[in-house]
Amino acid sequence: MQSLSATRIAFIGGGNMAQALMIGLQQRGFSMSNITVIDPDASKHAALQAKLGVNTSEVLSAAALAVDAVVLAVKPQQLQAVAQSLAPHLQSQLVISVAAGIRTGDLSRWLDGYQTLIRTMPNTPAQIQAGITGAYALPAVSVGQRDIADQLLQAAGEVVWLEAEDQLDAVTAISGSGPAYVFLMIEALTAAGVALGLSEAQSQQLSLATFKGASLLAASSATPVATLREQVTSKGGTTEQGLISMREHDIHGMMQHAAAQAARRAKELGDQLGAQ
């Protein structure tokens, strides 16, 4: 595996996702002097320099882009203009997009046909280095460049590599939108506890610890999650009654429908953004 340590990286955009990756790199001992953040908002520069020790630039210049990898961390609506300004500066750099919904075909078109591209779909727990990112690389990306991207993205959590780009719509529906589903379930379980007589603080503490503990147990165990569920469910017991109610309300169907709707919307947004 090619080492990330000597890689020079330019982040275009210094927002939450860029900072999540940079903080993760910093925690792993990466030399922050190898990072340049390019952001037109000069008010961010002093804070980024003080917090992370990175270099900063207000403009896309040849000097700022004399790097090995460029991370596009701007809003999807801004990416076309950024890509068109970036195109003249590209030679052999790896370009990694964390902009939701923008397909590699459209990004390549905006970059005058450039093909050394990786498209990713991270999620919000990346902000505490507990995220997961779906990633797809075009064939022009070398094995070494993919290794570099894998190590960089792991700074914010786990990475899943995909063989087909359209799978990113499913990634968006499951892990991209998934934190909101979990937050909703925590809200609902907390409200259920309040309805049963607990205080909101007590119910929220119980709910948060339950989701955290169950997730950590499932992640650290070789036992299938269905078996873990069965181990909690005594015949004729309290858990069984709760699960019967959930099945009567078709919890599986609800989740599948929610994910299908999210994936459909992800495809629609990709169509809209690419049509610019």
Image (cartoon, helix red, strand yellow):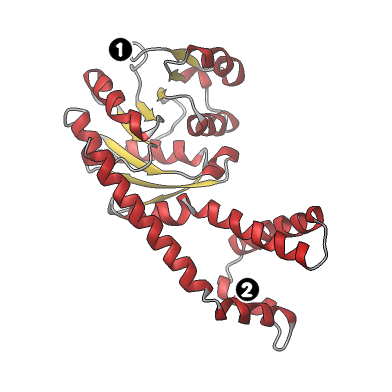
Viewer-nearest residue: 163 or 166 = 166
Residue 41 locus on image (x, y percent):
46, 16
What residue is drawn where x is 67% and y is 77%?
A: 242
Image quarter (top left, top right, bottom left or bottom right) of the C terminus:
top left
The image quadrant where one finds the N terminus is top left
Determine the CA span between mark 1 and mark 2: 55 Å
Give the labeled residue for mark 1.
62
Residue at the spot 61% in from the left edge and 65% down from the top edge: 221
Crowding at label 1, few (<14), some or many (≥20) Cα neighbours within 10 Å? few
Q: Position of residue 27 (x, y in %)?
A: 60, 32
Q: Return the residue at label 2.
A: 228
Q: Going by the image, does 213 lie left or right of 264?
A: right
- Can you name the residue that lies furthest to the front here? 195
Q: Position of residue 80 (x, y in %)?
A: 27, 29
Q: Is residue 240 above or below residue 204?
A: below
Crowding near the residue tagged with mark 2, few <14, some 14–19, many ≥20 C-alpha atoms within 10 Å = some
Residue 255 appears left or right of 100: right
Quick check: 169 left or right of 56?
left
Up the image or down, 233 lies above or below 70; here it is below
Please report the residue visible at 31 percent of the width from the left and 24 percent of the height from the top: 82
276 shown above or below 223? above
Q: Is residue 115 visible?
A: no
Residue 85's quadrant in the figure? top left
Q: Position of residue 146 (x, y in %)?
A: 34, 40
Mark 1: which secondary structure? loop
Q: Is residue 139 left or right of residue 48?
A: left
Q: Amino acid at mark 2?
A: Leu
Q: Which amino acid lies under the numbered mark 1 shown in the image of this protein?
A: Ala
Q: Measuring 53% from the left and 29% from the top, which residue is drawn there? A: 19
Picture quarter containing residue 103? top left
In depth, the one of 7 and 15 nearer the eye is 15
Q: Using the rendered image of the protein, determine whether residue 272 is visible from the camera's viewpoint.
A: yes
